[in-house]
Image (cartoon, rainbow, N blue to C red):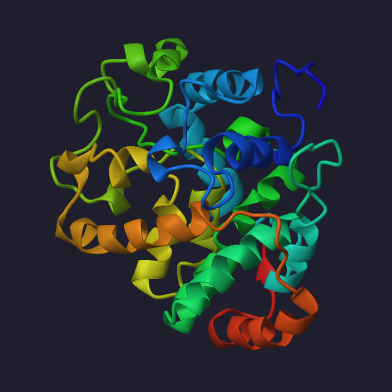
Amino acid sequence: MSEKTDPANPLQNIEDWEDFVETASYPEPGEKLKDAYRDYDNPARDTVREFYRLNHAYQTYAFVKGKKDEFVYSENKRRSMSILEAIDYLNTLIDDSDPDIDLPQLQHLLQTSEAIRLKGYDDWFVLTGLIHDLGKVLCLFGEPQWAVVGDTFPVGCRFSEKIVYPEFFEANPDSKDPRYNTRLGVYEEGCGLRNVEMSWGHDEYMYHQVKDYLPEPALYMIRYHSFYAWHREGEYTFLTDDHDREMLPWVKRFNPFDLYTKCPKEPDWDELQSYYKDLISKYLPSEMEW
C-alpha cells in the first residue's frame, strides 16, 4: 500500500481503515489476546494517526448538526436501494493493494451475522450483524473517511481523555468554546444518549435508516457499536439514563461479534442468500431511500 496520503483524506480507500483494524487492532482469532486488540499506541500505519487528527479536529457540534440536516432530515436523497443492493453497492469498496486480507465488505458483514446465528440468537440480532456497517455507503456518496469510520463520541460537551488520541481535540474549536467545553456542555445530567449528538459517521447514519423497523437493542448496537469510550471505557455515564444502562449489555454483547470474527475464511453468499433475503424482508422495506 502506498505510503503517500492526501492530507484531506489520509485513508485513500475505506479498505485502508479495514486493513488497519484487521492487522493492527483485530487480528485473526486465536493469534492475539483480546487485551492486545485496538493497540493505538502502536498503530500499523501512520494513516491511522492522521485519520484521527482530522476526525478530532473537524467533528464539531455544528458539523454534526449540518450532516444530519444533509443526510437524515433532507428530502433530497441520493439513491433508492434495497438492503441487498446497498450491500452490493458497498461491496465495490475493495483495496487490491491490501497485503493481508482482501475480503470485500460483504464478507465482514456475513462473518459477523453468521457468528451471531451460530450462537442461536434471535433473527433480528443476526440481521443487525448483517447491516451494522451499511452506513459506510457514505463513502460512496463522497464523504471523507474521517466523517464515516472510526470511534464515535459525543459532541457538544467536553471530550473525554479516554477517546483514542485525545490530544488531537486541541485543534477542535469546540474544545475552546465555553458552550461546548464543560463537563455537560449543552446537555443535562442523565439526559439519555438519545438526546446527545454523536460524532457523525456510518453508525449514526445507519441508525436513522432503520430506526422505525428494528427492536431497540438492535438500534443501540447499530448506533453505538463504535462508541468505545462508553461501552468499553465507562465514560460519559453522567449523560446516560436508565434506558441506556438497560441497553448497554446488548451493545457489549454485539461487540465481540464485530471484532473477533474477522478472518480470511469466506462464508458462501450463494448458499446463504436465500436465508438473508427472507430475513431482510421480515423486518425491512423492500426499497429504502439513501
In the depicted structure, whether residue 161 falls above or below residue 222: above
Question: Which quadrant: the C terminus?
Answer: bottom right
Q: Please tell me whether residue 244 is drawn above or below residue 36 in the rendered image.
A: below
* 140 and 231: which is toward the camera: 231
Up the image or down, 126 lies above or below 142; here it is below
Q: In the rendered image, which quarter contains the N terminus?
A: top right
The residue nearer to you, when weighing 201 against 19, is 19
Residue 6 image point, x, y percent: 76, 18
Percent position (x, y) of residue 46? 63, 18
Q: Is residue 169 visible?
A: yes
What percent of the width, then of the height, locates residue 259? 50, 51
Q: Splitting the image into 4 quarters, where does residue 244 fall?
A: bottom left
Which residue is found at the position 77% from the left and 69% from the top?
Answer: 85
- Residue at 57% from the left image edge and 44% from the top image edge: 27
Disc tally is 0
Residue drawn at x 42%, y 14% is 173
Query: Which of the 4 image quarters holds residue 160?
Result: top left
> Of all residues shown, which one is farthest toward the right?
96
Q: Position of residue 170 (x, y in %)?
A: 40, 11
Task: Tell me which corner region of the image, top left, top right, bottom left or bottom right, holds residue 47.
Answer: top right
State left or right for residue 278 relative to residue 112: right
225 is higher (above) or lower (below) than 149: below
- Residue 137 shown left or right of residue 4 in the figure: left
Q: Is residue 82 visible?
A: no
Q: Which residue is located at x 46 percent, y 67 percent?
A: 211
